[in-house]
Amino acid sequence: NSKGEKSAAATKRIYELCDVGHKQNRVPMVCSGKYDVLTPLAQCLTQESGDGRHLACLALNNLSIPTENKRVMALGPASKEVIGGLCKVIAEDKQESYLCCICLMNLSFLEASITTILQHSPSPEGKELSPLDNPNSLLRVLEKLLTNSPSAPKASSGKSEGVRWACGLIKNLAKSEENAALIGQTEIPKCVVENIRAATAPPSRWTSNSLEDFSLFVILNLAQWPQSREALISAGAVDVIKPIMAEGDLQGLK
């Protein structure tokens, strides 16, 4: 339909305005107060057209990189729509799922945003729902992504990329006690312990931003707090971590 095509063309233009060659536009596009590109981009995420959705994901990813933009995107007037749109794409298991995890991970480097992001819990009737009681909350959506992943997804397939970047996002979100307590009440601790257990490469070969590296960081962050520590112990984290400690390298140090 022509409306969908127009919308995809406009989204493409916005993406081009903030691509690698136009990094200088990223902050003014979000922070100048002159434009609201976030609301329409967030709406594109929930549209059916694959092209428009893909371009909106790429644009939001680029816009989420500058520090100044993170606060506006994660905590500003359009934040509910941005986080909600990204969460919905992950929930629907679309091809762009991994891009949405990366975008949320970019935003979650702003420590002030991690509660808002993890506790995103939309309810159709507008009533307050705890993230644990809401299958559509980001917490449950990420849990589902991790628990539904095949035990050995093909490396760099869309599925494995989604799981990898979801673990990167969870690593950042697990930095507060409140968030860690929520994560500890899901299957996520079991999943990250399993990721380490299933690793085929030795720890010294784990690269930065790999599934194993992210999973180890999630364990590291969850281990700081009493409630989530218990969940890790129940998931068998101790047996999985001990052999890594024996390596005596950077991963062992963690």
Image: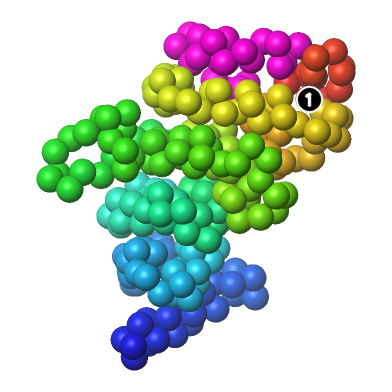
Compared with 81, 38 (above or below) is: below
Does the magenta run of residues contain 131? no
Compared with 11, 163 (above or below) is: above
Location of the N terminus (image quadrant): bottom left
The residue singled out by tag 1 in the image is 251
Q: Give 24 or 250, whichever is nearer the viewer.
A: 250
Residue at 61% x, 56% y is 158
SS of the residue under disc 1: helix
Total of numbered circles in the picture?
Answer: 1
Residue at 54% x, 23% y is 189
From the top left corner, tell me how far across and down residue 3 is, in percent.
Answer: 31, 86
Q: Give 217 or 241, whichever is nearer the viewer.
A: 241
Q: In which quarter of the image is residue 222?
A: top right
Q: Which residue lies furthest to the bottom in this view?
A: 2
**Highlighted range, magenta:** 217-242
From the top left corner, tell me how far across and down residue 242 is, in percent.
Answer: 76, 11
From the top left corner, tell me how far across and down residue 132 is, in percent.
Answer: 32, 28
